[in-house]
Image (spheres, rainbow, N blue to C red):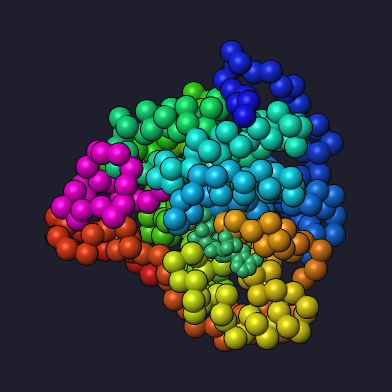
Amino acid sequence: MHILNFSPAYTVYTVRPTPHKHRELHRKQAMASPAERSSTCHAKIPDFLVGPVGQPMPAVGLGTASHPFVEEEVRASVLTVLELGYRHIDTAALYASERVVGEAMSEAVCCGIVASREELFVTSKVWCTQCHPELVLPSLKKSLRNLQMEYVDLYLIHWPMAVKPSKPHFPMKREDIVPMDLSGTWKAMEECHRLGLAKTIGVSNFTTKKLQELLAIANIPPAVNQVELNPTWQQKKLIEFCKDKSIQVAAYSPLGGQRIPIMNPVRQSDVLEEIARARGKSVAQISLRWIYEQGASMVVKSLNRERLKENIEIFDWELSDGDRLKIGRQIPQRKLITVQNLLCPEGISSVDISDVDVLEI
Ligand SMILES: NC(=O)c1ccc[n+]([C@@H]2O[C@H](COP(=O)([O-])OP(=O)(O)OC[C@H]3O[C@@H](n4cnc5c(N)ncnc54)[C@H](OP(=O)(O)O)[C@@H]3O)[C@@H](O)[C@H]2O)c1
């Protein structure tokens, strides 16, 4: 396979900036209500505008944290989604998927599935073991080498927690947790942006309290907060807070995640199933459409072409008020991913991390 290198010295594809007309359309779409957005949208997947300059971020992206991680499966899913019209791929230093994501994206450019790198939106994240002021920039540079790209579109602090420097891994030892220098770490993120290596910067798994701490010291506010969000973990307080502060919420585990395939709270929800049956949609589509109607973008993982296609067929219809009420009132709330999932069960942390895991409803 021919790998096309995205670094300037090897760039062999045409750079095609987003025409002004398209930017104006993106702006109108992002400002419109979800219902208006779906009716005025020409592209298959609409954009939200994020960050100080309003960078278009596709409402649906492909998640590439795959358990178990099989490189060829992830490569195939990236190529499949690019063919289907996705333009946003979510990766992280932790996922071991950056290299294959970069390879599949350059292959897509080479084959003409995608016109140029500029059409794509790539998110990556710095892991807890590199959440130290002096390690953020080297971690991003390593991610860029893996991706074979000059920049990422969005760079996130993966969790508001620092662990002794080592290769990104989990579960992590509780004894290795160290106090996080949030101010120094965020300054390093701002430096990544200033250097042009990250078009926008943001966070992940931040509660309203953590966001408040960050907003008090940030020169550049976080553009995005990527969090667990779906009808079984609705995050009303966080969504309101982020709306107020112009922080775009991005949903992860929008279908309840991969860890609980049987009796998955989203995919096996009776309430969602009833709505899905009545509307002739799948349960997954009801969940994704609900997320979109909250004004959130999402990253969803699948290795199956039909499901990947189904997951973006959510923009030309709406939930009814009755559906929204049922989802809002009848679904028990339960957070699936907590910081405890990232840590070894044994051991004791000398750092109080109880504020990382506050459950805000
Ligand atoms: N920032 C963070 O801390 C964080 C944490 C977790 C995840 N993430 C990101 O979010 C992405 C998505 O979250 P996730 O991977 O936890 O889980 P998810 O997207 O909620 O669910 C993925 C699971 O749902 C299945 N699925 C996908 N589409 C479906 C459909 N239409 N119908 C039925 N089943 C369907 C997939 O199986 P098949 O593959 O068999 O289709 C897969 O097992 C991750 O890949 C990662 O990029 C970020």
Residue at 47% in and 27% down = 145
Give the residue at x 55% y 75%: 266
147 to 162, vertically: above or below: above
Residue at point 57%, 33% (across, down): 103
Residue 273 sits above or below residue 63 on the image: below
Asked if residue 239 lies left or right of residue 59, the reply is left
Magenta-span inclusion, residue 51: no
Identify the residue shown where x is 65% and y is 82%. 273
Residue nearer the viewer, 46 or 105:
105
> Which SS does the magenta portion mostly show?
loop
Please, is residue 215 above or below residue 301 in the view?
A: above
Residue 152 in view here: no
Q: Quadrant of the N terminus?
A: top right
Q: Quadrant of the C terminus?
A: bottom left
Count of picture labels: 0
Q: Is residue 45 left or right of residue 95?
A: right
Relative to 224, say whether 133 is above or below. Answer: above
Image quadrant in which you'd find residue 93: top left
Q: Where, by quadrant of the figure, is residue 344 drawn? A: bottom left
**Is any atom of residue 84 visible in this view?**
yes
Q: Nearer the viewer, residue 264 or 159?
A: 264
Residue 36 location in percent, x, y?
Answer: 81, 60
- What range is drawn magenta here? 157-179
Where residue 183 sits in the image (x, y, percent)? 33, 40
Left/right placement of residue 208 relative to residue 320 reads left
Q: Quadrant of ligand 1?
A: bottom right
Q: Is residue 249 left or right of residue 187?
A: right
* 174 falls in the magenta region: yes
Q: Position of residue 30 (x, y in %)?
A: 72, 51
Where's residue 71, x and y in %? 50, 44
